[in-house]
Image (cartoon, rainbow, N blue to C red):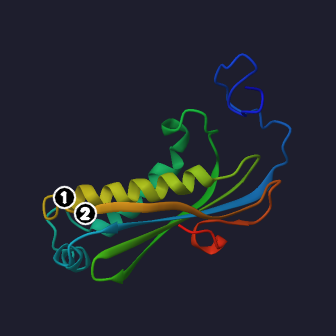
Amino acid sequence: MNDLSHFDASGASRMVDVGDKAVTDRRAMASGRVTMLPETLRRVLDRTLTKGDVIEVARLAGILAAKRTDELIPLCHPLPLDAVSLRFDFPDARTISIEAEVRVTARTGAEMEALVAVSVAALTIYDMCKSADRTMILGEIRLEEKSGGRSGHVLTGHDSGRDA
């Protein structure tokens, strides 16, 4: 059990002590997708769904979620986030692509915050569109990139060369 960072020698859960780590500029990017019927995406883009502007509500939900990640994931450290941004793209007639970037100057990285931002933005899109389309699929949520700290700059996801 000693090799596991979130468990002590007796197997009890613990929060990792980051007190001796250097404070550095850290950045994490995550992505995800929501696939839906073409008519649903048209209504999202035209802002004609009854719940309002889906993309802007999802953006705000993602930002709020990143700020509250430590309340959702039990062993995450609370972080004083410097910036959170979400970008939405529409690569085809059925897909909303979500990308979150989180920046922080801290002793630990912001990977979980970026992943939570994307996840909650996708869930918000689902919630706002479900009355029009119950066939939506949320998926491909992944860390794309991180930088700062001991491991430096790391590309993951599609850019790593690893099969998805």
Percent of width and height locating residue 103: 65, 60
Please report contact status of discs 1 and 2: CB closer than 8 Å, yes or no.
yes
Q: Residue at x 13, y 59 (%)?
A: 131
Mark toward the start of the polypeptide (1 vs 2): 1
Residue located at (30% from left, 62% from top): 137
Badge 1 marks a residue whose secondary structure is loop
Between 121 and 61, the one nearer to me in the picture: 121
Q: Residue at x 46, y 59 (%)?
A: 118
Q: Is residue 155 left or right of residue 69?
A: right
Q: Looking at this view, name the residue that lies furthest to the top.
A: 10
Image position of 101 with respect to 151: above or below: below
Mark 2 residue type: Met
Give the residue pinned by disc 2.
136
Q: Is residue 31 left or right of residue 153?
A: left
The residue pinned by badge 1 equals 130
User: Dividing the image into 4 quarters, which one contains the N terminus?
Assistant: top right
